[in-house]
Amino acid sequence: MKYYKVREKVAIRQAFGEALIELAGRDKKIVAISADLGGSLTLDEFGAKYPDRYYNTGVAEQDMIGVAAGFALRGYKPFAGTFGSFLGRAMDHVRQSVCHNKLNVKIVGSHGGISNAQDGPSAHALEDFAMFRALPNMLVIMPSDPNQTIKAVEALVKHNGPAYLRLYREPLPVFTTEETPFTIGKANIMREGCEVTVVACGPHVGLALEIAKEINIDIEIIDSHSLNPIDSQTIIESAKKTKAVITVEDHSVNGGLGSAVAEVLVENYPVPMERVGLHSFATTGSYEEVANYVGIGRKDIIKAIRKVLQRK
Amino acid sequence: MNNAELINQAREIRIETIKLLYEAQSGHPGSSLSMADILTALYFRPVLKFDPKRPEWTERDYFLLSVGHAVPVMYTALTLAGYYPKSKLKGLRKFGSDLHGHPKRGTFPGIEISAGSLGQGLSVGVGLGLALKLDKKTSQVVVMTSDGEQEEGSTWEALMFATKHKLDNIITIIDKNESQINGPTRQVMPSLDPLKEKYEAFGWEVVEIDGHDFDQIIGALKQGYAARGPFAIIANTVMGKGVSFMEGDYKWHHGKLTDEQYQQALKDLNI
């Protein structure tokens, strides 16, 4: 696989598209299906390269999922993708046609969270983690940088079963390398620390690494790229060490990473905890403006770290 | 089988289906009976390519039951066709039984997809049809839907998409029994008709048949197999066909049979 250089900035939706093209060259069972947003997921390039393995159902998300299920019935490995915000209307098809049938369909939700900031609230995917995480056997993955995205796509092609891969619109800095391990269900400790644990996913892992350099608090940073299954062991061990945890995600605080981590801690090792995420629908603006407005920006994370530290 | 034998076979399927539903004291008799003749034709004078001893045979044609609540008649037809031991055909809707209330893939041989939430089978069928094309197989996909199911918008998404790909290995049969859970279909959704013209406007070739006439069912299927694009069979049927007090009554979409009704049903079916 072709990896990106550290500190380069690349959108993980682009890394996804490039990885899928490379993998489809070796694996003829990979097909891609979009609901008229192939361009936004860089699937149009896939279609240009493999015209007989790319399908556009038009603006019809339910059909996209059903068609993907049909391909999986014949042993294909369909990747069906659109904006994460539009997958809600296809959830019944995901539940019955994909999950009840136990089919090997990979669902890709791009423009996760508020990353499609300027399109406004209708284009923001704030509930997708919660929806997909509730489905039995459904993997839920959100990569934190372009190189990890490549590894995630590779792992998902190998995995036989339904999965949700969440992508992001904003370019993200590369901080992992080919050597950085990636295992589904196994979180990566990106920085060891002893005062506060920061469990993050997606864009907030890179942001947490930047924050660690700026504040005088020794934070431990866990990249929880797998939300389902979540790596309980790593989270519990870190909580035992730091005795204070915050979660950071571009998603509703209900049902996403914060909820998943809270479930693990409450059942195993309760410690003071703060969840950074959205409490309501967002608004329109630049990415930075909207992120700060909804409370998932840099200052919000620092505030949560300080707050949880006081609660120890 | 000749027509006289098919008529007898259909009667046996109806009787076994009624027994299942009576034992369950729950379920959907109306559509099970309205599509009994279609399933009899499919599995007993086969145009459909299948092998009951090898349900996963890769060269088979695929029959997808999208209208999941009619599954009792599917269990019966599959069993009598040799997919499942007749001695085990019981326990519909009971805990631990293979005969789930709605079709569940992997629990009963010959059931290709889980169904129950309506309007999903056609999309899956179209995906399957496209996959068969990629595999360079000549197998056909037959998707059974109902008239009430046409109210699901996703049905029309699938219709458009099949036409886009000029898919010639997909056939859908619509069991037009004019009934749904809340009332006669013409009352719940009067604008569903004219259905044939709607399908034609979406680019499908359509034939309309009497869904209780074996020659017409088989003829339409053969026509569908030979068609050069997506093909729909609108089968006009009678809700609860064969049982006097159920015929044409939407209230038998679902319901339980009393002892007296059960005896009457068996009598109607010439036991």
Image: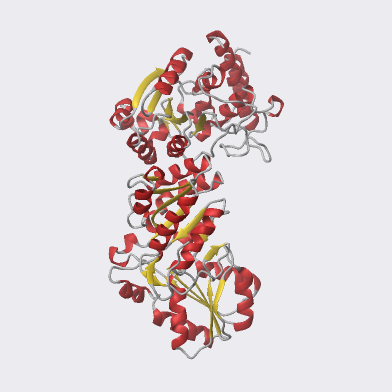
Q: How is the image coloured?
A: secondary structure
Residue B4, compared with residue B37, is above or below; it is above
- Can you give x and y, in whole percent of width and height, for residue B237 in the image? 44, 21
Foreground residue among A160 and B149: A160
Residue A133, compared with residue B121, is above or below; it is below
Residue B193 seen in the figure:
no
Q: Quadrant of residue B60?
A: top right
Name the residue at 34% across, 49% down. A48
Q: Is residue A299 left or right of residue B101?
A: left
User: Which residue extends farthest bottom?
Assistant: A216
Foreground residue among B57 and A136: B57
Q: How many marks?
A: 0
Residue B237, compared with residue A213, is above or below; it is above
Q: Quadrant of residue A185?
A: bottom right
Name the residue at 39% across, 73% down. A8
Name the residue at 35% across, 32% down. B166
Residue A200 seen in the figure:
yes
Name the residue at 28% across, 30% down. B201
Foreground residue among B166 and B210: B166
- Can you give x and y, in whole percent of width and height, for residue A82 in the image? 38, 54
- Can you give x and y, in whole percent of width and height, for residue B121 in the image? 46, 37
Position of the C terminus of chain A, as image quadrant, is bottom right
- Can you give x and y, in whole percent of width and height, for residue B106 in the image? 61, 39
